Amino acid sequence: MSELVVTTGKKLGSTQKFNQNGTRIPVSLIAVVSTAGFKPGDLLKISGTSKGKGFAGVVKRHGFHGGPHTHGQSDRERHAGSIGQTTTPGRVYRGKRMAGRMGGDKVTLKGLALMDIAEKEKIMTVKGLIPGPINGKITLTKYAEMKKFVPLMSDGKYAEIVPDEEKIAQQAEQVAAMEKKAEEVKTETDKTVELKEEKAEGENNA
């Protein structure tokens, strides 16, 4: 098991890059205090404070479906419904899912791969999305290494496609041949039309 290495930083934002297999990868950029002990291919555990959403109802906060929109329903489509447990136990259980303040909680994500490090700028590129708003404080912990790690392109873009000059030349020859054949067909058609017109004119004169 790899030695635990911990550092702190702030979230800069998210973008997309390509690895050496040409696969597009969503990544997050993190400005860290120190890059010592980290290298591309490390698996990270990242903790941060999620975005605050304010006071939210049960539909947004917990994914409730709400009540029916018919059968006399008028103003309770997004209501939580009954919360009681009848006479026994005669109270509401602790932890009942209800409306309340949403977000602003500590969130920890595990298994995020470190894709690249800019040593000079002290910026890490991490695969996937991380919790918190831009400039939010986060903690990074290295706990393992990827066994099958594919690094990013050196410039962060997909490999440039080099044009095949031989293939382009063959395509140009095919186009030229098609144009020549079309011209020949047009010439033959024009001659046929002229012969028909001359024959019709001779019949009329006779």
Image (cartoon, grey):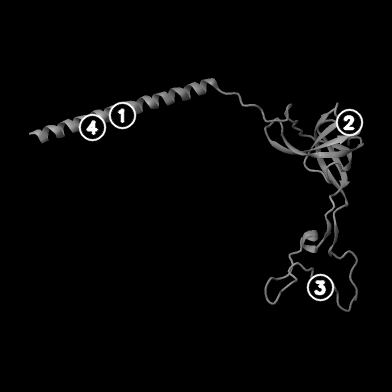
Label disc, if present, on residue 82 of the rendered structure: 3
Q: Quadrant of residue 17?
A: top right
| Residue that badge 1 annotates | 186
Q: CA distance from mark 4 to mark 2?
A: 82 Å
Closer-to-camera residue (77/147): 77
- What residue is drawn where x is 36% and y is 24%? 180
Q: CA distance from mark 1 to mark 4?
A: 11 Å
Closer to the chain start, of discs 4 and 2, is: 2
Label pair 2/1, CB-CB below 8 angstroms: no
- Residue furthest to the bottom in view is 87
> Where residue 140 sits: x, y (%)?
88, 39
Amino acid type, label 4:
Val
Q: Which of the two discs, 3 and 1, sits closer to the camera?
A: 1
- What residue is drawn where x is 79% and y is 71%? 81
Closer to the chain start, of discs 2 and 3, is: 2
Closer-to-camera residue (203/106): 203
Label disc, if present, on residue 35 of the rendered structure: 2
Q: Quadrant of residue 201?
A: top left
Closer-to-camera residue (88/137): 137
Query: Judging from the image, what secondary structure is the residue with disc 4 in?
Result: helix
Q: CA distance from mark 4 to mark 3?
A: 88 Å
Q: Which of the two discs, 2 and 1, sits closer to the camera?
A: 1
- Residue furthest to the front in view is 205
| Residue that badge 4 annotates | 193
- What residue is drawn where x is 26% and y is 29%? 190
Pointer 3 local density, CA inside 10 Å: few below 14, some 14–19, many at least 20: few
Query: Judging from the image, what secondary structure is the residue with disc 1 in?
Result: helix
Query: Judging from the image, what secondary structure is the residue with disc 3 in?
Result: loop
